[in-house]
Every structure is written in C-alpha cells, then in structure tokens.
Amino acid sequence: MTRRRHQSWNHIKPSPQPDHFKPTSSPNQHSPSVNLLLSQLRSSQSSHNESDTPSPRATISVVIPSVPPSLQNLLGSSPPPPPPPRPRVGGPTARNRLAPGPPPPASWLHQSFALPAEPSSNTSLTTLLDLPLPATPSLLHSTLLLLSKNWSFHQTYDQHYLPHLPPRLKFLLLIYLNRCNIAITASGFSLLFSSGAEETTHLDLSHTNLAVLLPTFRPSTAVEAEPESWDTATASVVRFSALTHLSLAWPRRQDLKVLLKVLELTPGVTHLSLAGWEITNWRAVTKRTLCLRWIDVRGCSTDTIKELFGCAAWIGEWRRVGTVVMRKGLGMELTGDRVREMRRKEEVRTWLEVQTVSA
C-alpha cells in the first residue's frame, strides 16, 4: 500500500506586519474625547454667529424667547420680533424656473390656429350637413387647419395617403378648404375620392365650379361584365351611391345644365343646399331629386322662390320634403300655408316647415 504523505506547514512562519498597519501613535497617546470635540464645535458656531454674514444654519438655530399673548398684557412686555425670513438655498424659485430644453420657435407662438370665419353668404352650413365640426382647441382641428393651409404641398407629397382617410375626415377637410378660401380642383377632388367614394355620405362643394368637378362624379369608363339584372346595372352607374347630404351653395359659376347632371349622378340626396342659385325651371330639378327631404334656398331671389312654391312638385316628386330654409324679409312667409293646404286636399301627410334665417 502506498503511504499517505502528510504535508507539514510548520516551517512556514508569518511575515512581520507591514508598515502601513502599524499604529502611528504610541500607546500612551490618547485621542481627544467626545466632550472636547463638542465644546470645540460650540465655540466655532458661536464665533461664526458673531460675524457679519451669518450662515443659514446658524440663523435658523437661534432661539428667540417668547411670551404667550395672554401674559404680554399683564407683564407689559413688548411683543417678540417676527421670525427672520428663511434664506433662499439653491437656484431660482419654482416661479422663475424655466422649462427644460430650448425655447419654442417663434412660429409656434405667433401662428393662429383659429378657423377662419365662415363667409356671410354661407351661414348655418352644419345645419344642412348634420355633422358637428371638431372643437377649436383640439388636435383634429389643428391638423385639418394646417392640412388645408398647405393643401398644395400635401396634395403632392401625401397623395398615397389622402385617399385612405375615413369618409368623415374627407368631408371635414372639404369644409376647412372652403373656409380657407382654397378652391378644390378636379385633380384634388379625384385624388381625395379615388378610394371610398361609395362610402361617402356628406359632400360640401360650396363656392366651387361644378363644371370642373363634373367629370369626377361620373363612374370609371372601364369595361365591365354584363350585369345580371337591371338593378345591378343601375347601381353600378352611380359613383357616390351612399351620398345623402350635398351642399352646392354659392357656386363660382352658375350652369343649370351642370347642376342637373350632378343631381342625376347623385339620386339618393335627401338634404340639398342650392343657396345663391337662380333657377327658372324647378320642374327639371324636382324630377332628379325624388328622395329629397330638406332644401336650402337662402340667397335666391323672390322670383325664384315664387316659382319654387308655385310648382306642383309639393304633392308630387317633393311630397316628402318637410323643411325649406330661405332668407327672411322676402314676404314669402305665407307660402308654407298654401303648400300645407294643397297637401291637405291631396291627403299628403308630410308637414312642411318654412324656416327663415337672417342671411
């Protein structure tokens, strides 16, 4: 068997203690006591208090004797002095604290984000379109306003994104363009509605040239397969098949033929604004608006409104029209009574309300 080897460590001796572990003082030397250190600290503080510029800590630590108010009158002692103000330690106060980062650009401070005032000839627009505008201090309002003011830029650089906006935002964008006095062109209108035209329910084309926008209402001329029935053939011709609210008020150029063509291409309109139009042949208009429920004729002349209420469409094509909005002061307030009497005789149950506005 192999014998175990026991290693012995007796020959290793500990090395002497290094010099940096040796005490610096002799054992007979004593360190200062705690009482001595406290007395030295008090004497240094008292000498510092007697100087001309007292420190904040020294000022705060001074205790001023006081007498209760109930004993001051009895003893006749003077009221104690008010406490000294606390010194301001550190930088500026919270009132003068500046916001982190660089200052905002001047354009952010002076640029106006208010929507321009609606033209006086086109008031009560939201009454027709039946869709509320966004609140003025909101992100949607600021975005639509900046988008409208820089429409030429976005029309080019955002041409791949504008067609995919929701129908409600497209309608609001048209309103903001109208308020900013930016005329929508055929290229801009066709770009905006190159996608989602069949889902659009509201269109604001006030202060526009309908002759320029007429080609955009027509469906594409692509060759399609033969429809299975006449119903599908008729539905495929209409591009804005879901359109119900249409504003054609105050056109830049009046053309009755263009108006009739637009009405033919939007047969489902129930709310229509023809404010500012001079129409002599209302019969042609009524035949193309069989679904009409609400019409606005503000700004039309007295002769135009007389011909409107004189036609027989109130008991025919327009038997479902329940509201007519016109300008106040034309002397046509009794026309609603005559139409209601006419409908009563013909047993038409739709009540006609004539609303007069100041503009």
Image (cartoon, rainbow, N blue to C red):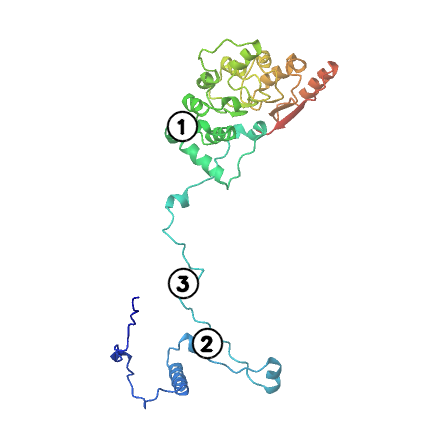
Q: Quadrant of residue 127?
A: top right
Q: Quadrant of residue 270?
A: top right
Q: Which quadrant would the N terminus be assigned to in this image?
A: bottom left
Above or below 269: residue 140: below
Q: Do tag 2 and tag 3 residues touch (Cβ < 8 Å)? A: no
Nearer the observer, 126 or 217? 217
For discs 1 and 2, the disc positioned in front in the rendered view: 1
Tell me how far mark 3 sits from mark 1, CA to CA.
Answer: 51 Å
Q: Which quadrant would the C terminus be assigned to in this image?
A: top right
Q: Residues within 10 Å of mark 3 (few under 14, many from 20)?
A: few
Which residue bears the numbered disc 3? 92
Coordinates of residue 191 in the picture (x, y in percent): 42, 24
Q: Residues within 10 Å of mark 2 (few under 14, many from 20)?
A: some
* Residue displayed at 53% across by 10% down: 227
| Label drawn at residue 201 | none
Coordinates of residue 111 in the picture (x, y in percent): 41, 42
Above or below 63: residue 285: above
- Name which of mark 2 and mark 3 comes first in the sequence: 2
| Label drawn at residue 60 | 2
Q: Is residue 347 shown left or right of residue 118?
A: right
Tell me how far mark 2 sits from mark 3, CA to CA.
Answer: 21 Å
Label 2 element class: helix
Label 1 element class: loop
- Name which of mark 3 and mark 1 comes first in the sequence: 3
Coordinates of residue 233 in the picture (x, y in percent): 54, 11
Which residue bears the numbered disc 1? 160
Tell me how far mark 1 sits from mark 2, CA to CA.
Answer: 69 Å
Identified by mark 1, the residue type is His
